[in-house]
Image (cartoon, rainbow, N blue to C red):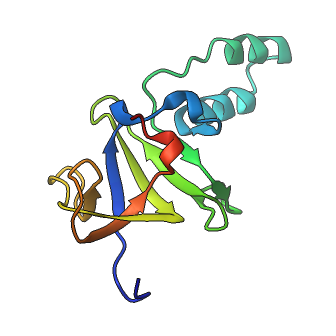
């Protein structure tokens, strides 16, 4: 592949993921909730722990794969890792592969919901995009 060619974010239905193979996920919502609890000066340590124990991760946007955190606490893809992807909430039910050492070629771009992103479910074509490793795709 020519290094000057565009490689788009790849988007795949979350229904096609082998979730049992995902071993590293970061829930941004749960991180924010936990941070708020930890910084709440009105709670003693026992109350903070009680609140933390009640945090449930349900239908949140998550990061999977290899990510790093900058000095401001913001995540960015670790380009020395295998892949970095965003799992959307059930509203879209998709996984956006924003970086990966795996690149494929697909037939179509996504709908207006994911502008300038390639549809990993569209079949073989000539649009280059990031892909997940084979072990994460259900057969």
Q: Residue furthest right?
A: 45
**Which quadrant holds residue 59?**
top left
Q: Nearer the viewer, residue 18 or 7?
A: 18
Does residue 29 sit above or below 101 in this rendering? above
Q: Is residue 65 left or right of residue 127?
A: right
Quarter of the picture holding the C terminus: top left
**Which quadrant holds residue 3?**
bottom left
Residue at the spot 55% in from the left edge and 44% down from the top edge: 64
The percent position of residue 2, horizontal first and vertical second, equals 40, 88
Does residue 110 sit above or below 50 in this rendering? below
**Which quadrant holds residue 125?**
bottom left
The percent position of residue 11, horizontal first and vertical second, equals 32, 51
Q: Nearer the viewer, residue 79 or 58?
A: 79
Residue at the spot 37% in from the left edge and 73% down from the top edge: 7
Q: Is residue 125 left or right of residue 74?
A: left
Does residue 14 sit above or below 66 in this rendering? above
Q: Residue furthest front?
A: 139
The percent position of residue 97, horizontal first and vertical second, equals 43, 54
The percent position of residue 25, horizontal first and vertical second, equals 60, 38
Q: Is residue 113 left or right of residue 132?
A: left
Residue at the spot 41% in from the left edge and 83% down from the top edge: 1
Q: Nearer the viewer, residue 98 or 3?
A: 3
Q: Is residue 30 left or right of residue 110?
A: right
Label count reads: 0
């Amino acid at each position: 592949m020519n290094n000057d060619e565009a490689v788009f974010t790849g988007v795949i239905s979350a229904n096609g993921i082998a979730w049992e193979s995902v071993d590293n996920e970061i829930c941004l919502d749960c991180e924010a909730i936990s941070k708020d609890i930890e910084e709440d000066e009105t709670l003693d340590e026992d109350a903070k722990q009680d609140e933390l124990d009640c945090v449930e991760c349900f239908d949140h946007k998550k990061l999977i794969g290899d990510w790093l955190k900058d000095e401001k606490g913001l995540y960015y893809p670790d380009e020395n890792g295998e892949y970095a992807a965003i799992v959307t909430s059930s509203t879209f039910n998709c996984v956006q592969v924003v970086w990966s050492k795996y690149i494929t070629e697909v037939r179509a771009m996504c709908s207006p919901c994911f502008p300038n992103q390639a549809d990993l479910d569209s079949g073989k074509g000539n649009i280059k995009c990031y892909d997940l490793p084979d072990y994460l795709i259900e057969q």
